Amino acid sequence: MITADEIKSLFHLKPHPEEGGYFAETYRSTESIPEGILPARYKGIRSYATAIYYLLTPDTFSAMHRLQSDEIFHHYLGDPVEMLQLRPDGSGKTLILGPDILSGMQPQIIVPGGVWQGLRLLRGETFALLGTTVSPGFEFSDYESGRRDLLVEAYPKFQDLIIALTR
């Protein structure tokens, strides 16, 4: 069976500088959307779409963050992942991204722009190779890290998971 280290090497994955986990950009549209066409929350020119490989291991997690754009997660290989989504209206939910669709896992999950998100492997698991597609395309200027204190205050029902998914 393939290991996380082999996947990192094969796909040239590097530590994600903000979020945690390991990633490599695999696609950035050569066409772009001019500034001023998209809503004001977008600054500058945007690619139509971007895509990455994203790897989680037991010593990593995707820290709570939100993006301006919609993000589609895809489960490619490995173990299931728990995702927390916190919506602007104060509601939230946990979802399982994984291969066992008969038990309710989802092979694809959509995170609407502006929704807080964080992910981690289920306890005892070894790795998950995921992919994400973002449209309009991802730019690091769109990334906002979640502050533990503010998220716990706004979403007290999810306190334990917020603490686990923040630094």
Image (tube, rainbow, N blue to C red):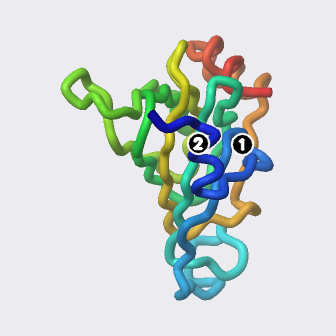
Residue 29: percent from the left, percent from the top? 52, 80
**Amino acid at circle 2:** Leu
- Spatial distance from mark 2 to mark 1, Cα to Cα? 11 Å
Q: Evaluate if marks 2 and 1 touch, with contact meaning CB atoms under 8 Å apart.
A: no
Q: Do we see residue 122 in this rendering?
A: yes
Q: Which mark is residue 19?
A: 1
For the N terminus, the quadrant is: top left
**As rendered, which of 12 and 42 lies closer to the eye?**
12
Q: Secondary structure at mark 1?
A: loop
The disc at residue 55 is 2
- Circle 2 — which element? strand
Q: Is residue 107 left or right of residue 123?
A: left
Q: How many marks?
A: 2
Task: Check the image and report above or below for 47 versus 14.
Answer: below
* Residue at 58% over, 17% down: 158
The image quadrant that residue 55 belongs to is: top right
Q: Nearer the viewer, residue 71 or 122?
A: 122
Within 10 Å of the Cα at label 2, are there few (<14), some (14-19), or many (20+) other Cα atoms? many
Task: Point out the residue furthest to the front here.
Answer: 1
Q: Identity of the amino acid at label 1?
A: Glu
Is 108 positioned to the left or the right of 158 in the image? left
Of label 2 and label 1, which has the lower sequence position?
1
Residues packed near mark 1 inside 10 Å, few (<14), some (14 to 19) or many (20 plus): many
**Percent position of residue 47, x then y:** 57, 78
The C terminus - image quarter: top right
Query: Is residue 89 shown to the viewer in this render?
Result: no
Question: Residue at point 53% right, 87% down?
Answer: 31
Q: Nearer the viewer, mark 2 or mark 1?
A: 2
Query: Measuring 24% from the left and 31% from the top, which residue is drawn there?
Result: 101
Measured as percent of width and height from the top left, residue 82 is found at: 49, 26
Q: Say left or right for 111 vs 34.
A: left
The residue sitting at 73% across, 48% down in the picture is 16
